[in-house]
Image (cartoon, rainbow, N blue to C red):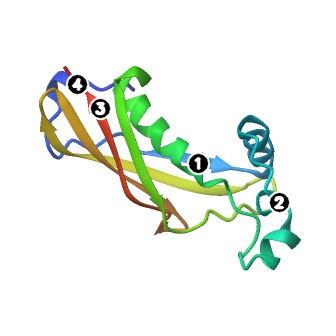
Amino acid sequence: MTADLSAVEVGTQLPPLTARITRKDLIRYAGASLDFNPIHWSDRQATESGLPGVIAHGMLTMALAGRLVTEWAGDSGRVIDLFARFTRPVVVPDDDTGAEVELTGKVTEVADGKATVAVTAKFEGRPVLGKATAVVRID
């Protein structure tokens, strides 16, 4: 649902987004990004690297944050900036259910025709992105 950007103010909540990431998604993303690191497809390699299992690509998780903001803004051209730090991996089990990532956003600043959005992305109830923000042109 596209927001009425003329009514955006500090505190505006973006519609939440819940996304599932499966191993099939990881294969598709690896092909698109050319990131074939085995921690994204091999349980053995992931655990030997000290991870709890196969993990989603960090940039895939960040792309979900971008999707949250873009769907709200209604036009990807309105998203001027997107920033996040990766704080925790999204472990993707080898099943048909995959991992569920819950995303929310809240406008924290409106100035000069732009809105700053704080994005929260959680997996298993814990944040996976830190200091995630987007700047959206609203004029």
Q: Secondary structure at mark 2?
A: helix
| Separation of residues labelled 2 and 1 (CA atoms) | 15 Å
| Separation of residues labelled 4 and 1 (CA atoms) | 25 Å
Left or right: 50 as drawn, with respect to 62: right
Left or right: 134 as drawn, with respect to 53: left
Whether residue 25 is situated above or below residue 56 in the rendered picture? above
Q: Which mark is residue 136?
A: 3
In front of the other: 118 or 123:
118
Q: Earlier in the sequence, mark 2 or mark 4?
A: 2
Q: Earlier in the sequence, mark 2 or mark 1?
A: 2
Residue 5 x/y as whole percent: 23, 24
Residue 29 x/y as whole percent: 72, 41
Q: Secondary structure at mark 4?
A: loop
Residue at (27%, 47%) from the top-left corner?
A: 106
The residue wearing badge 4 is: 138
The residue wearing badge 1 is: 59
Q: Which mark is residue 38?
A: 2
Circle 3 packing at 10 Å, graded few (<14), some (14-19), many (20+), is: many
Q: Identify residue type, mark 2.
A: Pro
Whether residue 11 is situated above or below residue 42 in the rendered picture? above
Task: Count the marks.
Answer: 4
Residue 127 x/y as whole percent: 45, 65
Q: Is there a contact, CB below 8 Å, between mark 4 and mark 3?
A: yes
Q: Secondary structure at mark 1?
A: helix
Q: Is there a contact, CB below 8 Å, between mark 2 and mark 1?
A: no
Q: Identify residue type, mark 4.
A: Ile
Q: Is residue 51 visible?
A: yes
Q: Is residue 75 visible?
A: no
